[in-house]
């Protein structure tokens, strides 16, 4: 179980980093990471159906109840009290959907932006029970199969990224710590 979930989270992370480039809205990268997660959880038998539909419905947030990341630097993290709506959303309204509303940055990326990439997968018993009791995500989440993961906890990896003129690069150089299962083992 741990290896399978870790590999899903790692795929979310690596696909997100690969997608970073000037002009791509960070909300689109968040949605990509959520779709990668849904596809992986489908392989484990925990979710079913179309990944894009599951993310649009908000079913991903049962396992990914937070945003993908946030800007780094002075006065950019936890902007709620300083007008995050205007900073991370360029005047557009933030979603009120659980999970998606925690995404702090949605605007198109620009060269020089420095931000985190930190998708995660969590199995939170209280949240699972709440969604199941409310009848949420019927036909998308297999709550019976999910029972086997109630004691799992969660996994998240963070990288700090700078957007360049042609793409992005990790802060700290090209040599990274091991993150794939094969590298770790």
Image (cartoon, rainbow, N blue to C red):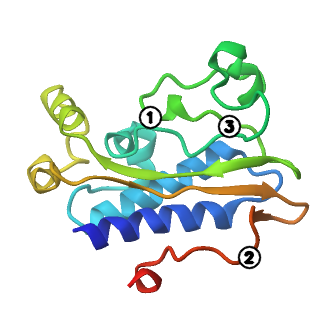
Residue 70 placement: quadrant? top right
Q: Is residue 16 left or right of residue 182?
A: right
Q: CA distance from mark 3 to mark 2?
A: 27 Å
Mark 1: secondary structure? loop
Q: Which mark is residue 174?
A: 2
Tags 1 and 3 touching, CB below 8 Å: no
The x and y percentages for residue 73 are 78, 38
- For label 3, the residue is 106
Q: Label 1: which residue?
A: 99
Residue 21 in the image, given as x and y percentages of width and height: 78, 59
Q: Is residue 8 left or right of residue 153?
A: right
Side (left or right) of 111 relative to 37: right
Q: Position of residue 80 (x, y in %)?
A: 63, 18
Mark toward the start of the polypeptide (2 vs 1) = 1
- Spatial CA span between label 1 and label 3: 13 Å
Residue 114 appears left or right of 145 = right
Q: Residues within 10 Å of mark 1 (few under 14, many from 20)?
A: many
User: Of callouts 3 and 2, which one flags the residue occurring earlier in the amino acid sequence?
Assistant: 3
Looking at the rendering, in which quadrant would you find the C terminus?
Answer: bottom left
Mark 3 neighbour class, 10 Å CA radius: few under 14, some 14 to 19, many 20 or more: many
Is 107 above or below relative to 87? Answer: below
Q: Residue at x 77, y 66 (%)?
A: 169
| Quadrant of the drawing holding the N terminus | bottom left
Other-residue count near label 2 (Cα within 10 Å), few / some / many at <14 / 14–19 / ≥20: few
Q: Secondary structure at mark 2?
A: loop
Helix, strand, or loop for circle 3?
A: loop
Identify the residue shown where x is 52% and y is 28%. Answer: 101
């Amino acid at each position: 179980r741990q290896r399978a979930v870790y590999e899903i989270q790692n795929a979310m992370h690596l696909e997100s980093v690969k997608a970073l480039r000037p002009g791509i809205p960070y909300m689109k990268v968040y949605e990509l990471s959520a779709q990668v997660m849904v596809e992986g959880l489908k392989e484990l038998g925990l979710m079913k159906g179309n990944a894009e539909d599951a993310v649009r419905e908000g079913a991903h947030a049962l396992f990914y109840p937070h945003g993908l990341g946030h800007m780094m630097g002075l006065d950019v993290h936890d902007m709620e009290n300083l007008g995050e709506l205007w900073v991370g959303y360029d005047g557009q309204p933030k979603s009120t959907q659980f999970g998606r509303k925690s995404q702090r940055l949605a605007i198109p990326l620009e060269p020089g932006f420095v931000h985190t990439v930190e998708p995660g997968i969590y199995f939170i018993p209280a949240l699972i029970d709440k969604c199941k009791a409310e009848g949420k995500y019927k036909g998308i989440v297999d709550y019976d199969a999910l029972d086997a993961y109630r004691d799992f906890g969660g996994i998240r990896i963070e990288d700090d990224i700078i957007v360049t003129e042609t793409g992005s690069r990790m802060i700290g150089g090209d040599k990274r710590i091991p993150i794939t299962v094969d590298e770790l083992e």
